Image (cartoon, coloured by chain):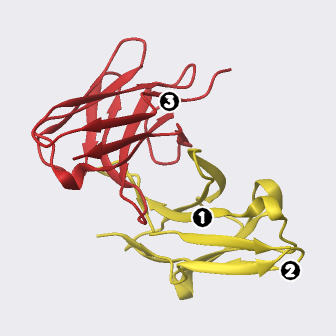
Chain colours: A yellow, B red
Amino acid sequence: AQSVTQPDIHITVSEGASLELRCNYSYGATPYLFWYVQSPGQGLQLLLKYFSGDTLVQGIKGFEAEFKRSQSSFNLRKPSVHWSDAAEYFCAVGMDTGRRALTFGSGTRLQVQP
Amino acid sequence: ETGVTQSPTHLIKTRGQQVTLRCSSQSGHNTVSWYQQALGQGPQFIFQYYREEENGRGNFPPRFSGLQFPNYSSELNVNALELDDSALYLCASSLASGGITDTQYFGPGTRLTVL
């Protein structure tokens, strides 16, 4: 069965600092990988997705993620964090066979210090 | 273009009761998925509907059931509520074949509290 691990429950960074959120997945075939962001009272917003091709994926709001098959990782990065980036971030993996479901990690809460 | 909307925003029920949550898909979308997000956890897949037929189901008991209507709006019904059903219920819609490569657009969720 597929699974997603986000090792960091909570991360605090200073505004303007760089950010990296970790995501490791377990899946036998080529995964479909996603990063979503959830602000309080809001639904999940898709930041970026990887299906195939270039392993460095650009998303919205200045985020990018890199797929590393050898490490089973799909880490999210941003070179300079803004206060408005404070939110919960979820990594998810999907498969295109059988159940058409996304499997989510438990999330990383990002706090931004002024 | 309107996004995904869900109603009600909040709901309080007691154990043993039944509840119906509603979702309006984004315009033109023919696939809807429902997820349960317990406090401090990531969303868990309940089921998906494509063109009014169930198209996949997660590890949830049969007392969780759903419907998708011809206008692609959807309902999630939960019977015999248990305390552990307290969670944020998220609806997500997508277009076309219902494959996982279709981007899922999420609504703001319904917060269900079971007392």
Q: Is residue B6 visible?
A: yes
Of marks 3 and 2, the one in the foreground: 2
Q: Chain of mark 3?
A: B
Q: Residues within 10 Å of mark 2 (few under 14, many from 20)?
A: few
- Residue placed at 49% from the left, 62% from the top? A92
Identify the mark at residue B96; answer none if there is no mark.
3
Q: Chain of mark 2?
A: A
Q: Amino acid at mark 1?
A: Tyr
- The answer to the question of whether label 3 and label 2 lie on touching residues, with beta carbons closer than 8 A, is no
- Residue placed at 52% from the left, 78% from the top? A9
The x, y position of residue B114, in whole percent, is 24, 45
Whether discs 2 and 1 lie on one chain: the answer is yes
- Does residue A89 sit above or below A39 in this rendering? below
Rounded to the nearest angstrom, the CA distance separating label 2 from label 1 is: 17 Å
Q: Amino acid at mark 3?
A: Ala
Identify the mark at residue A89; answer none if there is no mark.
1
The x, y position of residue A44, in whole percent, is 57, 49
Whether discs 3 and 1 lie on one chain: the answer is no
Total labels drawn: 3
Q: What secondary structure is found at the residue carrying circle 3?
A: loop
- Residue placed at 33% from the left, 42% from the top? B112
- Does residue B33 sit above or below A75 in this rendering? above
Q: Which residue is mark 2?
A: A17
- Does residue B25 sit above or below A99 in this rendering? above
Q: Is residue A22 visible?
A: no
The x, y position of residue A54, in whole percent, is 72, 67
Rounded to the nearest angstrom, the CA distance separating label 3 from label 2 is: 40 Å
